[in-house]
Amino acid sequence: PTEKGWVANHLHQYQGFWHTTRQLLAVLTCQNQFQAQDTDILLVTTPKSGTTWLKAIVFALMNRVQYPNPEVEHPLLAENPHVLVPFLELKLYIDNRVADFTTFTSPRLFGTHLPLGSLPDSVKNSACKLVYLCRNPKDTFVSLWHFTNKLRTKDMGENSLEDTFDKFCRGVCLYGPFWDHVLEYWKESLKKPERVLFLKYEEIKEQPKVQLVRLAQFLGCPFSSQEETNGVVDEILKLCSFDSLSNMEVNKTGKLASGEEYKAFFRRGEVGDAKNHLTPQMMEKLDQITQDKLHDSGLIF
Ligand code: A3P
């Protein structure tokens, strides 16, 4: 099935999820060509759930020994997080071949929005770890709507909040349905906690240190007590904070190979902004769908 639904593009449903034509080709290329390694780390997210933040945090975490003074010298000061941790499917498609990921040093870090069921077989059959990040559906939707608007040009016409909302509720959005995406990974994280770490944007906001320590343990590079005493955890969080990343010169200019400007990935970076944009009825509707979809899963937002 096909629906008009993303900027000016049609969305196509494949394996239960919606993709633009370009993304669908990317997903297929990725499924056919990507060769996972057991040491790979995949950062999996629903769009607008904090992908950029997670990429920065995990990159800084994994490279903390090489860069002991991140304020003075750090790759994040010179490169956007999406360059340092590329999207698996987009990089593969843009290069239109298997990009030479073999030159990446191990453990290789990738981002992806792929639903669990659409991950390449090589990922499914490997021991690589998955860090999954999601965000409450109301803020995710509002962030997605703003992002969509930033990518539209005047001649593309109206992109009303109501219409986009209606589609989101029906599951018609990038990598939607949102709830199915989240639920699949939630269930997988319960079944295989050593393989999938399930994180929420709101929890990182509320307890950044606790979540970062959890992340480091899961990835097999726990902070030593000396590192904790020396403020290494705080330093990473500071480097990767919204204010820090959004004010870096590198993130104010430039764009991804796929066309999105780096600055479009930074807006407010807060929890609860949805109430400034959605009517009480819209908030209630999203709450109701969330309750219906997740009711017996143990997952709450
Ligand atoms: P808002 O639109 O609500 O501000 P993604 O990276 O998955 O595309 O998600 C983008 C969302 O994450 C945007 O949300 C953006 O502002 C927010 N964000 C980006 N960097 C962040 C950071 N360092 N800390 C917290 N939120 C961040």
Image: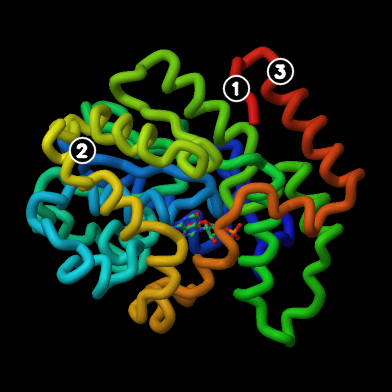
Q: Residues within 10 Å of mark 1 (few under 14, many from 20)?
A: some
Q: Element at badge 2?
A: helix
Q: Residues within 10 Å of mark 3 (few under 14, many from 20)?
A: few
- Is residue 97 among the parts visible in the rendering? yes
Within 8 Å of ligand 1, the CB of disc 3? no
Q: Amino acid at mark 2?
A: Glu
Looking at the image, residue 157 sits to the left or right of residue 113; the answer is right
Which residue: 51% across, 67% down?
266
Q: Quadrant of residue 42?
A: top left
Residue placed under numbered mark 1 in the picture: 299
Residue 265: horizontal and vertical position, in percent? Answer: 50, 66
Pick the residue in front: 184 or 206: 206
Residue 288: horizontal and vertical position, in percent? Answer: 82, 30
Q: Element at badge 1?
A: loop
Residue 7: horizontal and vertical position, in percent? Answer: 66, 69
Which residue: 27% across, 28% down?
218
Within 8 Å of ligand 1, the CB of disc 2? no
Q: CA distance from mark 3 to mark 2?
A: 38 Å
What residue occupies the far front of the structure in this picture?
229
Q: Please say if the residues under marks 3 and 2 sit with CB atoms less than 8 Å apart.
A: no
Q: Amino acid at mark 1?
A: Leu
Task: State which mark lies toward you, 1 or 2.
Answer: 2
Q: Is residue 91 above or below residue 279?
A: below
- Is residue 110 among the parts visible in the rendering? no
What residue occupies the far right of the structure in this picture?
281
Looking at the image, residue 282 sits to the left or right of residue 246; the answer is right
Residue placed under numbered mark 3 in the picture: 295
Residue placed under numbered mark 2 in the picture: 228
What mark, if any, has residue 187 been given in the picture? Answer: none
Whichever of labels 1 and 2 marks the residue nearer the N terminus, that label is 2
